[in-house]
Image (cartoon, rainbow, N blue to C red):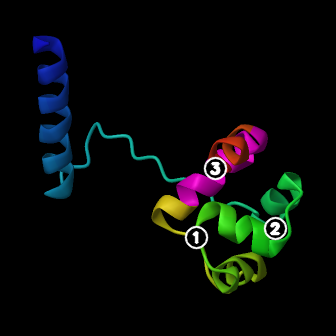
């Protein structure tokens, strides 16, 4: 348990340092911008089905697919995960 605590503590201390501007020795991961339409097509779903499955509006999905808006935060992460394992993720979301 002590090792887990120390690991979490170190991570939090590093996060605070990063937030305060100390960028040295830090790796930051930015999810890539996915091709939303290609991801949806791989699932075999239409826009209504896909939007409902991932918990967004059809209009938001349309904006993403047309490039008028870009997915951010959890939506971006979820799309990147679906891109890597569409069948697994869609199976989990359909339960």
In this view, the residue farthest toward the front is 95
Circle 3 packing at 10 Å, graded few (<14), some (14-19), many (20+), is: few
Residue 37: assigned label: 2
* Quarter occupied by the N terminus: top left
Residue hosting label 3: 93
Q: Which residues are magenta?
A: 76-87
> Can you say whether 44 is above or below 7 in the image?
below
Rounded to the nearest angstrom, the CA distance separating label 3 from label 2 is 18 Å
> Can you say whether 28 is above or below 64 in the image?
above
Q: Nearer the viewer, mark 1 or mark 3?
A: 3
Residue at 28%, 36% in the rendered image: 25
Residue 31 position within the rendered picture, expressed as x and y whole percent measured from the top left: 55, 53
Residue at 63%, 80% in the rendered image: 57
**What kind of element bears circle 2?**
helix
> Can you say whether 88 is above or below 57 in the image?
above
Circle 1 packing at 10 Å, graded few (<14), some (14-19), many (20+), is: some
Tell whether position 48 is magenta.
no
**What kind of element bears circle 1?**
loop
């Amino acid at each position: 348990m002590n090792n887990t605590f120390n690991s979490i503590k170190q991570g939090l201390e590093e996060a605070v340092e990063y937030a305060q501007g100390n960028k040295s020795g830090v790796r930051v991961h930015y999810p890539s911008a996915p091709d939303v339409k290609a991801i949806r097509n791989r699932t075999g779903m239409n826009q209504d089905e896909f939007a409902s499955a991932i918990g967004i509006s059809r209009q938001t999905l349309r904006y993403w697919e047309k490039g008028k808006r870009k997915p951010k935060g959890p939506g971006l992460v979820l799309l990147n995960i679906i891109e890597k394992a569409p069948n697994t993720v869609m199976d989990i979301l359909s339960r």
